[in-house]
Amino acid sequence: MTLLEQTINNLGVKGTIQHNGQRIRLVCLIHTKDRRPFQADWYKGKESYLVAVDENGHFFLRHSGGYIFKLDPNTKKEEQIAKGENEFINMIGWD
């Protein structure tokens, strides 16, 4: 079982990320095989894949360059969270 699969299996234990002094509670993680390019009318010209979603509706995307960023669908603001997927997964803690 991969690190991602183990983390998905345990997400029901209320997985959270601490980032910039903020606690972010994830509600879903997407298996690698189930990822598709993220598409929204307001998000054009960028190739990114949905990795996770938090309880506030923020999307966590994997950029084609490998890094993970948080996208706020209301403000369209992007914030880099991790340099890569394994770093992102290893950031997830349990309540």
Image (cartoon, rainbow, N blue to C red):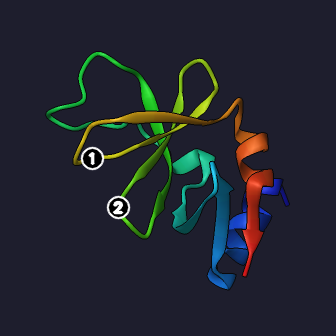
Left or right: where 16 falls relative to 63:
right
Q: Position of residue 62 (x, y in %)?
A: 55, 34
Q: Amino acid at mark 2?
A: Gly
Q: Position of residue 91 (x, y in %)?
A: 76, 54
Q: Position of residue 47 (x, y in %)?
A: 41, 22
Q: Residue at x 34, y 46 (%)?
A: 72
Left or right: where 59 falls relative to 43:
right
User: Which residue is label 2 attached to?
Assistant: 57
Q: Residue at x 28, y 15 (%)?
A: 45
Badge 2 element: loop
Q: Do the residues bearing badges 1 and 2 touch, measured as CB atoms within 8 Å?
A: yes
Identify the mark at residue 73; answer none if there is no mark: 1
Mark 1 Cα within 10 Å, few/some/many (few <14, many 20+)? Answer: some
Front residue of 60 and 19: 19
Left or right: where 54 falls relative to 39:
right
> Is residue 28 placed above or below 90 in the rendered structure?
below
Q: Amino acid at mark 1?
A: Pro
Q: Between disc 1 and disc 2, whose residue precedes?
A: 2
Q: Position of residue 16 (x, y in %)?
A: 65, 68
Q: Which of the 4 quarters of the picture holds residue 93?
A: bottom right
Badge 1 element: loop
Q: Residue at x 41, y 33 (%)?
A: 78
